[in-house]
Image (cartoon, rainbow, N blue to C red):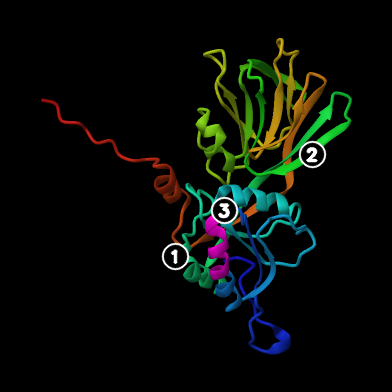
């Protein structure tokens, strides 16, 4: 089981060390405020709350904590991962959104699930994160970000076809003409990349999937490769009035021009997700995405 399970306090005999918990969420979503009160009461009955941040704006890099309870959907978890930066803690997500592929605990079952965590009846599954760097062609840094899902170079506004050159390390691999190009982790393979026609990667794989967005060529298909490379995206001289933007985990972070490039590499830290007993990856695929459902033959007359 996880290293975050309570352990014996040798100085106090058989007393158990209380978990130090951060409660994070987006208070602008209506269900979060009411659920946060319930969650805080349940946590404080069994553990210590060291951070209570419903704006997800607090710097968490120096906070001593064993667990982050995140209220909301997958977007709230992505934001929490960025907020924790290079000090990633195990995340227990309470699903107050629609899909909740990462936030798998329903509000009604939180108390029982949190008790299971306190008792050590869980595992922590680690997932690849990426480091994204937007820089000029001569190496001057314009923006950098840590992310979990995907990096996207996409057109617009105004929305015109763009040409994105893909390099793996120093080798030019392809030029994608279309609406843009996605570089996604295995976790991100079930998000924007999947909607663009990319494959599903098992979430514990250390790999990136490169998925074109509406490519203007039948031969341009998604590619899966190891996370041990540097992936470079460069914009060719755009057509008249075309523009492109860099989007990291759904957030626009900057404009991409032919005078700059985007570098995507493996991050030095890994995202850590609490996995409760009996809740497998394939179960989530079936229940949340409807994957693997059997086809029912229609009767013909």
Overall secondary structure of the magenta stretch? helix
* Secondary structure beneath label 1: helix
> In front of the other: label 1 or label 3?
3
Per the image, the residue denoted by label 3 is 29
The outermost residue toward the left is 301
> In front of the other: label 2 or label 1?
1
* Secondary structure beneath label 2: strand
Q: Would you identify the image quadrant in which residue 68 lies?
A: bottom right
Residue at 66% from the left image edge and 79% from the top image edge: 17
Is residue 274 shown above or below 144? Answer: below
Q: Earlier in the sequence, mark 1 or mark 3?
A: 3
Q: Nearer the viewer, residue 180 or 292?
A: 180
CA separation in Å, label 2 and label 3: 28 Å
* Secondary structure beneath label 3: loop
Check if mark 2's residue and mark 3's residue have beta carbons within 8 Å.
Answer: no
Magenta extent: 30-39
> Looking at the rendered structure, which numbered label has been put on residue 144?
2
Q: Position of residue 202 (x, y in %)?
A: 52, 43
> Looking at the rendered structure, which numbered label has been put on residue 17?
none
Q: Earlier in the sequence, mark 2 or mark 1?
A: 1
The outermost residue toward the bottom is 13
Q: Nearer the viewer, residue 142 or 6?
A: 142
> In front of the other: label 2 or label 3?
3
Badge 1: residue crowd in 10 Å (few <14, some 14–19, many ≥20)? few
Check if mark 2's residue and mark 1's residue have beta carbons within 8 Å.
Answer: no
Residue at 57% from the left image edge and 53% from the top image edge: 29
Q: Earlier in the sequence, mark 2 or mark 3?
A: 3
């Amino acid at each position: 089981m996880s290293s975050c399970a309570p352990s014996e306090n040798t100085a106090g005999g058989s007393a158990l060390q209380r978990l130090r918990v951060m409660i994070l969420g987006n208070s602008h979503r209506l269900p979060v405020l009411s659920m946060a009160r319930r969650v805080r009461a349940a946590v404080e009955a069994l553990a210590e709350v060291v951070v209570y941040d419903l704006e997800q704006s607090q710097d968490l890099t120096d906070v001593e904590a064993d667990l982050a309870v995140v209220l909301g959907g997958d977007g709230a978890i992505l934001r929490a991962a960025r907020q924790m930066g290079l000090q990633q803690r195990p995340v227990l997500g309470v699903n107050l959104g629609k899909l909740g592929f990462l936030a798998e605990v329903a509000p009604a079952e939180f108390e029982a699930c949190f008790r299971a965590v306190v008792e050590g009846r869980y595992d922590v599954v680690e997932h690849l994160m990426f480091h994204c760097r937007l820089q000029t062609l001569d190496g001057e840094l314009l923006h950098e970000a840590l992310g979990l899902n995907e990096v996207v170079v996409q057109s617009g506004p105004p929305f015109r076809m763009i040409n994105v050159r893909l390099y793996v390390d120093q080798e030019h691999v392809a030029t994608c003409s279309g609406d843009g190009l996605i570089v996604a982790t295995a976790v991100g393979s079930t998000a924007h990349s999947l909607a663009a026609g990319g494959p599903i990667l098992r979430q514990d794989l250390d790999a990136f999937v490169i998925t074109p967005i509406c490519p203007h060529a039948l031969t341009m298909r998604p590619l899966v490769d190891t996370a041990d490379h540097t992936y470079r995206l460069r914009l060719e001289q755009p057509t008249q009035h075309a523009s492109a933007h860099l989007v990291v985990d759904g957030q626009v972070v900057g404009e991409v021009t032919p005078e700059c490039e985007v570098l995507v590499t493996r991050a030095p830290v890994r995202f850590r997700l609490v996995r409760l007993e009996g809740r497998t990856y394939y179960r989530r695929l079936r229940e949340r995405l409807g994957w693997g459902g059997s086809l029912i033959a229609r009767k013909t007359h």
